[in-house]
Image (cartoon, helix red, strand yellow):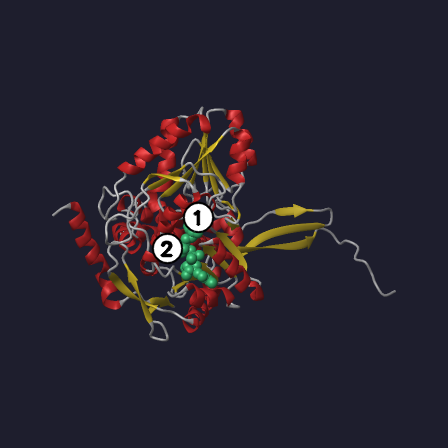
Amino acid sequence: MSVLQDNIAKATAYLAHFRDTGVLNHIDGQSVPAASGQTFETVTPTDLSVLATVARGGAEDIDRAVAAAKAAFPVWSKTPGAERRKILIKVAEAIEARAEEIAFTECMDTGQALRFMSKAAIRGAANFRYFADQAPHAENGEVTRTPTQMNTTSRRPIGPVGVITPWNTPFMLSTWKIAPALASGCTVVHKPAEFSPMTAKLLVEIAESAGLPKGVLNVVNGFGEEVGKRLTEHPDIKAIAFVGESRTGSMIMAQGAATLKRVHFELGGKNPVIVFDDADLDRAVDAATFMIYSLNGERCTSSSRLLVQDTIYDEVCARVADVAKRIKVGHPLDPDTVVGPLIHPEHESKVLSYFDKAEEEGATIAAGGEKVGEDGCYVAPTLFTQANNDMAISQEEIFGPVLTAIPFQDEDDALRIANDVDYGLAAYLWTNDLNRAMRMTDELQAGMMWVNSENIRHLPTPFGGVKASGIGRDGGDWSFDFYMETVNVSFPRATHKIPKLGG
Ligand code: NAD
């Protein structure tokens, strides 16, 4: 048996329980079908076969899940931080113990390659560990004094929160929202993406088996415009942490307006990687190709615009095209695969539509630009050259293994092009001139910048975007600011004079 066949056999065994029972909702510690009894099918993008039926939740399911989260909140929010920490560390350990199952399930459900997904569970566990360690002191604030008053601030968990996640790396993404929410003392209703519901169910089962009390984390599956909408409108949900497209973020903001919902948005990107002619080109090419062709390019921080100084544009494009052509496209469970199938035929059609658009707009397809094979959603790693920043391929988030290369002349030109998009999530800068790096990073419109590096995440640092890429920051203490309310209590330091009114 080849490694791939062996892995497919293992995945089939891991997925058997989902095939038998379907992907159910999880409310108040119970796996339950949708109240309406309705289901939808989740398919694998490897060959579009059905993996399982999924509970198609509706308003009633959200109402039940919110009621469970509300009922669990008083006890969980008052559980000492050190106790919450212990439970969340156990969750991290339980995730690690089932890392292979999570990775294989994710590969089959999303099409992401095993070489990257094998780390997704470990990274998810790291999220739990990191935020667990902050739980014991999350409520602490500061003391400030005036001549008459002593002010003490502290933080309290905001209440039951809604977490709405997308389909790219769903396990890892849901843990970086759910872990800080739970560490803060909030209870959660999670609405996973309809294209990738499986690992959310694993997460809640793992968490409860590790000791998370019933009702603290609940999962309701279904469609965005049905359960997602109801969750964002629910009066007992105090905040919504959302990861997804910018236009969905704007809908959620409108839906949550009537109940004054606090929102945290991690949205789309069209991130530049800017390469000056003094850069280490070997490293720049490796980093640029890694950031667009890993995770199928379905990555919010992907370097989807390659801005290259005109003096080295042809050379860099030739090198990137060469890498793109050599990348292995294949089954996600093949350990050699770099690019697996895109999540779903709908998304594949969107990505393929940009190949025609690129040619209509006058760009050149220097690599890829085509579907691979007949079955499944496989698309070749693609490079568009001779592009300018006005083209749709330069402005719109394609969210696939598709890179648009644009030449620039000098620093001003690079900055103008880099900033001339609606988005502002990440930027990557390649230069060996320190002063230039300082000038550029001062002016780049992005929430996160990496100089001479690909995206390397460090959990204590802030993660998030500017402009249409998001509102709020994850990581470090920023996550706690979102899931908690800061309150101030003022005490008199002495018997001060109180103004007397009325005579
Ligand atoms: P999407 O916006 O279509 O869906 C995300 C989630 O929102 C899904 O669970 C969906 O069901 C739900 N949803 C849809 N309509 C809704 C509504 N009206 N009310 C409430 N919920 C609703 O996004 P997607 O296509 O699943 O994911 C890809 C997008 O996610 C890309 O734009 C990508 O850049 C972005 N993303 C951003 C980050 C980040 O950190 N900035 C990380 C990963 C992905």
Residue at label 2? Answer: 167
101 vs 476, left or right, is left
Q: What is the crowding at mark 1: few (fewer than 14 residues within 10 Å), some, or many (at least 20)? A: many
Depth check: 375 or 158 in front? Answer: 375
Q: Secondary structure at mark 1?
A: loop
Residue at point 73% right, 51% down?
A: 494
| Percent position of residue 439, x then y | 55, 30
Q: Residue furthest left?
A: 1
Disc 2 to disc 1: CB gap under 8 Å: no
C-alpha span from label 2 to label 1: 15 Å
Which quadrant of the frame does ligand 1 lie within? Answer: bottom left
| Percent position of residue 246, x then y | 49, 53
Depth check: 389 or 144 in front? Answer: 389
Query: Can residue 40 be seen?
Result: yes
Q: Amino acid at mark 2?
A: Trp
Q: Nearer the viewer, mark 2 or mark 1?
A: 1
Q: Amino acid at mark 1?
A: Glu
439 vs 292, left or right, is right
Depth check: 378 or 493 in front? Answer: 378
Can you tell which quarter of the image residue 188 is in?
A: bottom left
Residue at label 1? Answer: 397
Query: Can residue 138 be seen?
Result: no
| Percent position of residue 114, x then y | 27, 46
452 vs 499, left or right, is left
Q: Secondary structure at mark 2?
A: loop
Judge: label 2 CB < 8 Å from ligand 1: yes
Residue at point 43% right, 67% down?
A: 227
Residue 201 vs 85, above or below: the answer is below
